Amino acid sequence: MNLKQKTEFVADTLEEALGAYEGQAEDNVLDCLMRTVLSQNTNDVNRDKGYAALRNKFPTWEDVCRADVQSIGETIKIAGLHTQKSRTIKDFLTWLKRERGELDLEFVCEMETEAARQYLCQHKGIGIKTASVTLAFVCGHDVFPVDTHVLRISKRLGFIPPTCTADKAHELMGEIVPKGRSFPFHMNLIQFGRQICNARKPKCDVCALTEHCLYFKGKL
């Protein structure tokens, strides 16, 4: 079984156990991008609290764009790395307003995937994961985001080398994930990582993938 076949087998197994995700999770590109910036190096709960606080204090992105970076930072403090994230948010919105004349990112959905990803990643603080999540979750692009859960599981299952970085993993996983299934496979891997293949105490006794797992075989 080569890597592509193995990846398809895992995708099929998880889909059978967890179901198939349909559609996308978000409906606004800029909303998703900003929420994903806040998600960096924190958990979903604190990300959502930070995002809610930001939108409560500044109801529109125009309001955020006009605010000073310190005020933005204090508002999103619960999301962590608030100094860095507030600068990313402020700089990106300022640039978008200057370049496009409005704070609207819907046009990236019409771009070719790699061009759209490069367009977003040209900005400091917006990496390949943030861009990939946005394009997959909103635009429906067949792009595979690699977050912490996905990176861990991909190494354990031997999809990527043990020392592979998250950025490199986006390239390698993009070559072997079944075409047209990036979004549901990504979502199922996250659920699998939370429920079964967690970081500290994976529940190998109830895992259906141990036959293909380097971690279970003691090789990782």
Image (spheres, grey):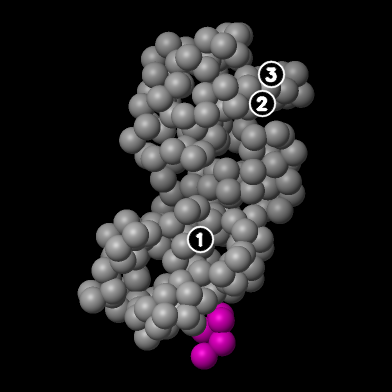
Q: Earlier in the sequence, mark 1 or mark 2?
A: 2
Question: What kind of element bears circle 2?
Answer: helix
Q: Position of residue 186 (x, y in %)?
A: 45, 60
Q: CA distance from mark 1 to mark 2?
A: 27 Å
Looking at numbered disc 2 in the image, what kind of residue is underneath it?
Phe
**Which numbered disc covers residue 94?**
3
Give the quarter of the image for residue 18.
bottom left
- Magenta run includes residue 2: yes
Which of the two marks, 3 or 1, is nearer to us in this view? 1
Residue 191 in the magenta stretch? The answer is: no
* Residues drawn in magenta: 1-5
- Looking at the rendered structure, the kind of residue marked 3 is Thr
On screen, 99 above or below 154? above
> Residue at the spot x=35%, y=71% of the render?
14
Decide: is 133 above or below 96. below
Q: Nearer the viewer, residue 18 or 85?
A: 85
Mark 1 surroundings: few (<14), some (14-19) or many (≥20) residues within 10 A: many
The label on residue 92 is 2
